[in-house]
Image (spheres, rainbow, N blue to C red):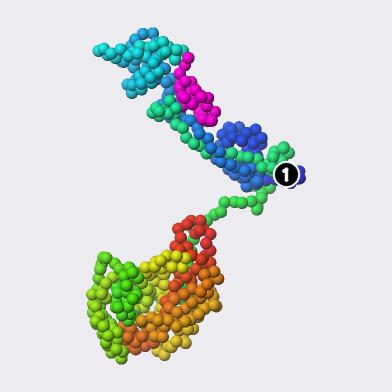
Amino acid sequence: MNPSDLQKLAETLHPLERKTFPLLGKTQKFSEIVRLSGLQEVEVMRALQWLQNKNIINLKDSYQELVTLEEFGIKYKKDGLPEKRFLNAVKDKKLGMAEVLKYAKITKEEFSACLGVLKSRSAIELEKGKELVVAITEQGKNILERGMLEDKFLSKQFPVDTASLLPEEKFAVDSLKKRKAIIKVEIHREKTPVLTNLGKELLKAKISVGDVVDRITPAVIKSGSWKGKPFRRFDIEINVPKIFGGRKQHYRAFLDDARNRFLALGFEEMTGPIVESNFWNMDALYMPQFHSARDIHDAYYVKEPKHAILDDKILKKVKASHESGGDTGSKGWQYKFSDEMTKRTLLRTQGTACSSRMLSSKDLKIPSKYFSIARCFRYDVIDATHNCDFYQIEGIVVEDGLDFRHLKGLLKMFAKEFAGTDEIRIRPGYFPFTEPSAELFAKHPELGWIELGGAGIFRPELVKPLVGKEISVLAWGIGIDRIAMFKLGLNDIRQLFSHDLEFLRGVKID
């Protein structure tokens, strides 16, 4: 880098960087930089991080095994080890336990510890009588004269790096580690600044930026102290910490947007419980009780409460429709309808349960159009496009004279409006409660053709028992989870409910 560019770089340095950077030519030890700079540890670390952002240094992790003093270690560093004071107390004469405690100024617990340590080193002899008497040996006198390795080690400046220990000091560490609350040996991580080639150039150039104006304040302007001084340069392209403000969860935001779109199209929202009965979930939809979708491996049945309370008048009409067609002009499904089975509770398997409730409600308007955003549950093998816990947007349009052409128009509008794609397919389908029935597919750029939902026109056997008369009802149920994958650019349905904070911060929200 040429001298003028180095000068410009130097003029971008923060005051903390200007205090820290010159010291890197003397030491790379973080603790030494703190001591020499007179700055706090947090200020030095901040300065080093800024220097790294400017590619002047690289921060590397270095690990040290350090010995630090604990409660008794601090005490013994000041007063000496108990065994040293013990030997000093008995060096001239034999003493009993009470006298040793008095002259050595140690506790009974320390006395017991000293006996073990000194006896193992043949430093004392014990004489038993009415009272335990302690006498020093020649070995003990030699230890006292030479000094104890542990006592010498405690006189060092702490913390101590174990890599710098001499063999006898390592022996002292091993001995002290076995005793209570004297020393602690731990691995410490430290950031080590390493100069880059650019940093070496800047350090070698010894550029002085002088008295730089870092901030413009009213006082600086008023006093005119800024005149004749260089202003600190600011790098507007440098990396800065990202700020993650509060926002809605991406799928929650998508569902709210879908709700607002339906409301804007003139639909009214309908709701229903998650814990539903077989009656509203299937029977009221003219789904025969022997249908394969009722298999326990498809629905999650509820243990408590096991049965729901139903309106007997509506139940009687639906039962007649199933068994013989009732007054609908149909023959029905020709089987014995089970009152016990229809009251069985389960987790709602389809949003259409909200439609059956709405059609039987005294609040039903004709003509009208309704939608619901329903959380549903079905047993499934979880993968990139399937989940056992999912949402459906479903709805009905109630009006005389509606036919399949109206339904196709609705499906095309929904696919374009909510999936954002013109590539759709409407195929013939089968549902026990609609005739005719259709399935809606849309093309995903990565996953290919995906089924978005089913639709059809409700059969008279469903409508008349609930509404009380024959009328056209268009119905559809759309897997809104998959539409969300289109709009949010996801290729895995599980990401809709992700708890990964990094993912949640980066996912787009329309």
Report the residue at 55% width, 78% height from top: 422
Nearer the observer, 48 or 245: 48
Spot occupied by residue 456 in the image (x, y as percentages of width and height): 41, 83
Is residue 315 shown above or below 240? below
For label 1, count other residues whose C-alpha is less than 10 Å away and answer few (under 14), some (14-19) or many (20+): some
**From this viewpoint, which residue is outermost toward the top?**
92
Horizontal and vertical percent for residue 303? 27, 65
Magenta span includes 51: no
Q: Position of residue 336 (x, y in %)?
A: 24, 82
Local SS, label 1: helix
Q: Is residue 260 visible?
A: no
Which of 506/233 is in front? 506
Q: Residue 2's spot in the image, x, y percent?
A: 76, 45
Reply yes or no: does residue 172 show up in magenta: yes
Residue identified by numbered label 1: 6
Residue occupying image coordinates x 32% and y 68%: 300
Q: Residue at x 61, y 35 (%)?
A: 28
Residue bounds of the magenta highlight: 146-173
The rendered magenta stretch, by its main secondary structure, is classed as helix
Quadrant assignment, res 58:
top right
Q: Is residue 267 above or below residue 153?
A: below
Q: Quadrant of residue 181?
A: top left
The structure residue drawn at horizontal position 29% and vertical position 67%, both measured from the top left corner, is 302
Split into 4 quadrants, where in the image is the N terminus? top right
The answer to whether residue 383 shows anywhere in this view is: yes
Amino acid tagged 1: Leu
Q: Is residue 350 above or below residue 133?
A: below
| Residue 209 vertical position relative to residue 509 in the rendered view, above or below | above
Q: Quadrant of residue 62?
A: top right
